[in-house]
Image (tube, rainbow, N blue to C red):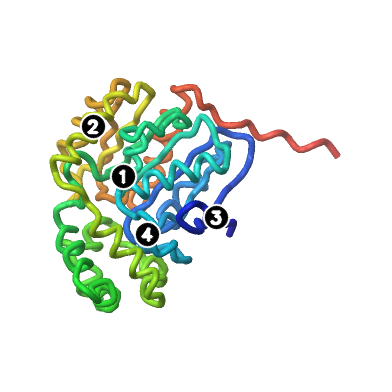
Amino acid sequence: MPRIELSCGPIDYQDTGGEGPVLVFGHGLPMNETQWRKVVPLLKGYRCVLPTLPLGGHRQPMDPGADLSQRGVALLLGEFIERLAMDEVTLVLNDWGGGQFLVSEGRAQRIARMVLVACEAFDNFPPGPAKALAAVCGIPGGVWLLTRLMRIPSFRKSRNGYGGMSLRGIPDEIMDDWFAPATRSRAIRRDFAKFATSTPKRETLLAWSERLRDFDRPVLVVWAAKDRLMPREHGPRLAELYPQGRLVEIADSSTLVPEDQPERLAEALTDFLIQTGAEPARTRPAPPG
């Protein structure tokens, strides 16, 4: 897997390459690029770039002094995009919504459009059921305890935790991969705790949200009809907030729409891209003979 050294430490990423429009995917806590494993193969003709952000599922620890707050990770994502010299980027977020803060921080010059898929918004950082997880992470040894609890099937599959994020259920091998770095590395657990406990006050979050009105480029909001973490009313509210926002609601899905309804998500995403001027690169026919 490629790796790039940024100001706060190393970032691993996947890059499908190609000449198509660039899509950059964000993920949740403590997930990684496998969150999108069902969707990316359906996006033919696009260059899909998937950084593993330092949200606890990253494989290499960040520098001890790294700013891993919501704002800090958003700026790190912006630095990643700049360092790879990617322009006219479509930023795609699911679960973690902090990538939107590139707009509130005035660092969205390279973002041509956004796709917000059942993600944190307004003052819903972290989502209601995840607030208890964040509280545990703030206790010394809390992340270590969480990694142990995640080995217990009843805890792992709880509808008030990760079990409630997907109607289909997250495969055990995927969940194991997400939690493996924090299980084996004290430095990763340090990073995990820094991010999980970094949420600013409600007033700050709402002030940042108001700045999102300045983003005058296309935004697709994809919301899940059976989401336990992201309030259903946040979907239309987000679409209305952005001047060029539009809403698609997907039935039979919880927060992890890429897990529950990858085909429908890929279809909605492709339609939006084509309608907003990001048509996929056409596959060249094989030479005769």
Q: Is residue 265 left or right of residue 124?
A: right
Identity of the residue drawn at 51% across and 58% down = 10
On residue 5, the disc is 3
Q: Where is residue 241 in the image (x, y as percent from the top left)?
A: 23, 26
| Residue located 57% across and 38% down the image | 85
Kind of residue indicated by mark 4 = Met
- Residue 256 visible, this orientation: yes
Image quarter of the N terminus: bottom right
Residue at x 34%, y 61% (from the top left corner): 30
Instruction: Report whether 157 appears left or right of 5.
Output: left
Q: Position of residue 120 (x, y in %)?
A: 24, 45
The residue tagged 4 is: 31
Between disc 4 and disc 1, the foreground one is: 1
Mark 2 lies on residue: 238
First in sequence: mark 4 or mark 1? Answer: 4
Residue at numbered disc 1: 98
Label 3: how many residues lie within 10 Å, few (<14), some (14-19) or many (20+)? few
**Cα distance, mark 2 to mark 3?**
34 Å
| Vertical order, 31 against 148 (above or below) | above
Q: Which of marks 2 and 1 is nearer the N terminus?
A: 1
- Foreground residue, 283 or 185? 185
Number of numbered callouts drawn: 4
Dot placed on the residue nearer the N-terminal end, 4 or 2? 4
**Which secondary structure lies at badge 4?**
loop
- Three-letter code for the amino acid on which mark 3 is drawn: Glu
